[in-house]
Image: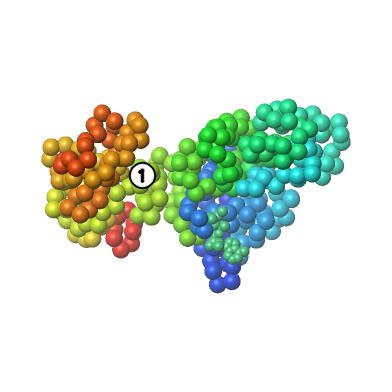
Amino acid sequence: MNGRGQVRFEDIIKMHGEFAALKGVTFDIEPGEFFALLGPSGSGKSTTLRILAGLDAPTSGRVYIDGRDITATDARDRDIAMVFQSYALYPHMTVYQNIAFPLEMANLSKAEIGPAVKDAARKVAIDHLLDRKPGQLSGGQQQRCALARAIVRKACLFLLDEPLSNLDAKLRLETRTELKRLQRSLGVTAVYVTHDQEEAMTLADRMAIFMAGEIQQIGRPADVFAKPNSLDVAAFIGSPPMNLIPARYKDGGVEIAGHRLETALRNGGERDVVVGIRPGAVRIGAKGIPAIVELIEDLGDTAILDLNCAGTLIRARVSDGDVPREGAALSILARPNDIHLFDKTTRRRL
Ligand SMILES: Nc1ncnc2c1ncn2[C@@H]1O[C@H](COP(=O)(O)OP(=O)(O)O)[C@@H](O)[C@H]1O
Ligand SMILES: [Mg+2]
């Protein structure tokens, strides 16, 4: 491996005319980290990846790899391998020729290329397919062919832009696991773009949440889930999404559907807030907010209840033993530590 795969993105702005696709993006990635860029469509994830790859130039800001300022360095002189959404395999070449291509470009001898191609193909389990053309491969195999081409270059930094999006659900799960294992065994840094929060949560060591050209939060998936720092991150992370209920905060509590809930926030000034409660944190009991079960969505081992609380919809996740009947009247509560509070105006976590 040539470098170490450390990345620094420093205050990157990308303008398309008047439109700011990136509004000052800063992050650091450690060598060997699996780092996800997660956010809704159009939030600037691919733009970030393309600037890192050298396919696009930033309007301002600096990009460093292994401490070296590469902002003005040509894409092919960066120690980076790209496995993009379309795998960009050459359709008229065999798998072998596709994997060998970067080595031929680097003028390696046939004696060096052969073993390197076979070794890389073995790592992603396509060494029996070397004579096929890409059109004769499944989506997952094409994916792995693109990965083998990245491996053969001995790049220390892998960039992946929604690499699993055109695989069917089952293959997507399998390939996801393989990808993580491969990244670990190669010890490379991976920068992984996805709009799928579950994919980011399961794969990433850390993730950056993109919204409208800005990073809202960077952290380990579990930490972002436990403490989303804004209303927008709270609404984006978690499935089904967090219940978000407008309310008035006063003296350490909030009132929802005429019932007071104690929060963990002490001495916050009286104000309008949005209360966040994850469906899994809603507790059904004898006391609390009166609720009517309007709809039950059975997921097998758990069920999602749509609860009508005096006109406010609250969704609860319950295990299969605790599923009430539709139309039942019950009461719900949440523990103070399970109640997230966001300022209504600034949308920041309180
Ligand atoms: N060449 C371009 N000209 C104008 N707008 C662009 C161009 N490329 C991207 N954009 C815009 O920049 C925003 C971010 O795009 P992108 O990084 O591709 O988003 P994501 O990958 O998060 O879906 C989008 O609103 C997109 O329409
Ligand atoms: Mg994109």
The amino acid on which the numbered mark 1 sits, given as a three-letter code, is Pro
Residue on which the image places disc 1? 240
Residue 348, above or below 178: below
Which of the 4 quarters of the picture holds residue 51?
Answer: bottom right
Which residue is found at the position 33% from the left and 36% from the top? 298
Q: Count of labels shown?
A: 1
Which residue shows up at 69% across the image and 36% down it?
Answer: 137
Where residue 265 appears, as percent x and y from the top left, is 23, 49
Judge whether residue 1 can be spotted in this image: no
* Front residue of 236 and 159: 236
> Residue 128: image x %, image y %?
73, 27
Tell me what residue is drawn at x 38 percent, y 43 percent. Answer: 239
- Mark 1 lies on a secondary structure that is loop
Tell me if 219 is positioned left or right of 348 in this view. Answer: right
Q: Quadrant of the N terminus?
A: top right
* Quadrant observed for ligand 1 in the rendered image: bottom right
Quarter assignment of residue 167: top right
> Is residue 83 visible to us here?
yes
Q: Is residue 269 above or below residue 34?
A: below
Q: Quadrant of residue 286?
A: top left
Q: Nearer the viewer, residue 202 or 54?
A: 202
User: Is the distance from the Cβ of mark 1 to the nearest ligand 1 atom less than 8 Å?
Assistant: no
Residue at image position (45%, 41%) is 198
